Amino acid sequence: MSKQKRKRKFQVSLRFFFIFTVVVALILVLPVQRSLIQKRGRVWVDSQNGHVTFAHKYDAVSGQYNHDLELPAPGWLVGILGIDIFDSVDAVVLDNKVVVDLSPLTDFRKLRSLGIMIEIDEQLDFSPLAELKNLECLHLAYTGISAERLIELQELLPWVKVTADIDPVR
């Protein structure tokens, strides 16, 4: 084989390698971006001393969480890439600091359940929750939310089951 033919064959291989690399990068960009956004949300929940539960722990048949379930991915790979690339946050509980902003919760695109078990700012804007189309359940306890505000919240989120412990004094 002549030197020129070998060089041409090598150029085709480089072209293939370049195209292959671009295709792989395009395939990976969406899951990686989603995982980075979700991780940002988890960092915010941690800053609020809240808790997250991942989707793999939820059993849709029983409607219960099994916190002993392991993620169906190799632990060493989860350690390298992070859990956010493999699973989505299913539930968030905020129960430690007064809640003044809910907009960071929009980082959880697949959030199904939200519990707020602590005081909320009287002017708290619930409208970011309208972006969470997978939200099914919102439970409010110890928030001091008024009945009027609860009705507004139910109108804002008609697809969500909203439950609350209403303070009878208000």
Image (cartoon, grey):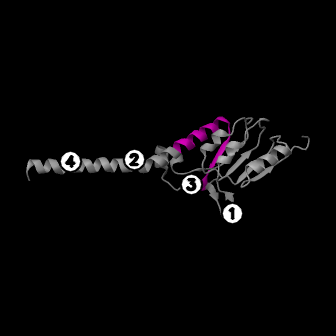
Please name which of the two marks, 1 or 2, marks the residue nearer to the observer. Answer: 2
Judge by depth and name the residue closer to the eye, 90 or 20.
20
Q: Residue 110, can we see it?
A: yes
In terms of sequence position, does the residue under pointer 4 or pointer 1 come before the other? 4
Q: In which quadrant will I find the C terminus?
A: top right
Q: In percent of the image, x 8 and y 51: which residue is there?
A: 2
Secondary structure at numbered mark 4: helix
Please name which of the two marks, 2 or 3, marks the residue nearer to the observer. Answer: 2
Q: Which residue is mark 4?
A: 11
* Horizontal and vertical percent position of residue 47: 64, 35
Please name which of the two marks, 3 or 1, marks the residue nearer to the observer. Answer: 1
Mark 2–mark 3 Cα distance, whole angstroms, equals 29 Å
Q: Examine the residues drawn in magenta and state their main secondary structure.
A: helix
Q: Residue 140, can we see it?
A: no
Answer whether residue 170 is magenta in the image. no
Q: In percent of the image, x 52 and y 42: which residue is there?
A: 36
Circle 4 Cα neighbour tier, 10 Å, few/some/many (<14 / 14–19 / ≥20): few
Q: Residue furthest right?
A: 169
Q: Which residue is mark 2?
A: 25
Identify which amino acid the numbered label 1 is placed on: Ser
Q: Which mark is residue 136?
A: none
Q: Which residue is mark 1?
A: 62
Identify which amino acid the numbered label 3 is placed on: Glu
Q: Is residue 94 above or below residue 75?
A: above
In terms of sequence position, does the residue under pointer 1 or pointer 2 come before the other? 2
